[in-house]
Amino acid sequence: MAIGTVNNPTAFNVYSNYSKSSTGLQKSMSRLSSGVKGVEDDGAGVGISERMRSQANSTGQARNNVENAISVLQTADGWMQEISDSLNRMHELAIESNDATKSDTDRTNIQAEFGALMSEITRITESGGAAKFNGKDLLDGDMNTATQVGADSGQTITLQVTDLSGIMAGTTVASSVLSTASTANVTTVSTAGKASIMISNLQTQIDDVGKARASVGGLQSRFEHTRSGLLTYEDNIRSAESKVRDVDMARESSEMSKNQILSQVGNSMLAQANSLSQGVLSLIG
């Protein structure tokens, strides 16, 4: 078979194969070092995986929102527990005051504790009061806002905490306003008559707080179920994205080994192919 002299087709063919092997080796090394496919490897797959990544990352942030909402509800319930404890003690004091054996001095002493507890409840529940989360009031009705709980538009849950700012006046959202006739100006247990009215009022207020806590508990349970669902969804979508985008390390390692061998052999064969035409020089002078 004739061998070209100026143009060496055998050497060119070997060089083409060598170039392919070298390029394949470089791509394999690049994929193995990054662990993911590039857009030149799977353009459609990269587009799909980027959307999946966005969904996964946004779902993670939504899960953080849900965890913050749970913290809000736990904090609100903690304050409600303090209010409930105070109301229970105030109810005891009202019953103690409505005792025919108590003197005015006794009732004055009872009223001192009763008034202090009432003031503490007001301090907790009023706007700008003690019950806060990240600077936001919890128990004055302002905590009533939708919070994003998913990666897509419209996936929200309203984070609502019952307004207890009027608890001592019987004007909480949790119940209808108490009768004005029975509660007008009655905020003390300084007399047996007032204590009798406060016994009834306090029982209603204790029930109001109980309803508010039940609402908080139900909402917290909902958020916790949402968090569990988001964790499962995020795990599944990250797994799916990995299958689309990540490099098969075992297969790519085999490809790299193959290309390394072909590149080395090609380099050697290129030297041999170039030497095929050297014999023609012996024919010249």
Image: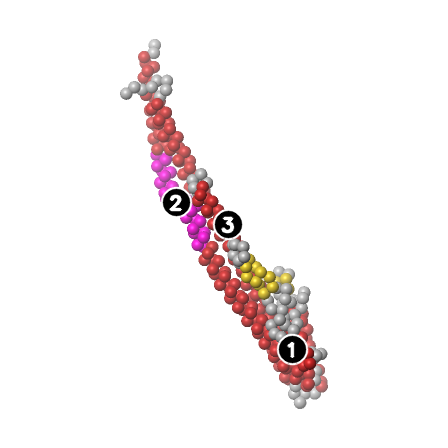
Residue occupying image coordinates x 55% and y 61%: 157
As drawn, the residue found furthest toward the bottom would be 101
Q: Which residues are magenta?
A: 235-261
**Residue 243 is covered by the magenta coloring:** yes
The mark closer to the camera, 1 or 3, is: 1
User: Which amino acid lies under the numbered mark 1 shown in the image of this protein?
Assistant: Leu
Say whether disc 1 or disc 2 marks the residue closer to the N-terminus. Answer: 1
- Image coordinates for residue 93, horizontal then vertical, percent: 64, 81
Say whether disc 3 or disc 2 marks the residue closer to the N-terminus. Answer: 3
User: Which amino acid lies under the numbered mark 2 shown in the image of this protein?
Assistant: Asp
Depth check: 67 or 33 in front?
A: 67
User: Which amino acid lies under the numbered mark 3 shown in the image of this protein?
Assistant: Ser
- Image coordinates for residue 32, horizontal then vertical, percent: 42, 41
Residue occupying image coordinates x 39% and y 44%: 249
Residue 182: which quarter of the image?
bottom right
Q: Is residue 196 above or below residue 121?
A: below
Q: CA distance from mark 1 to mark 3?
A: 52 Å
Residue at mark 2: 248
The mark closer to the camera, 3 or 2, is: 3
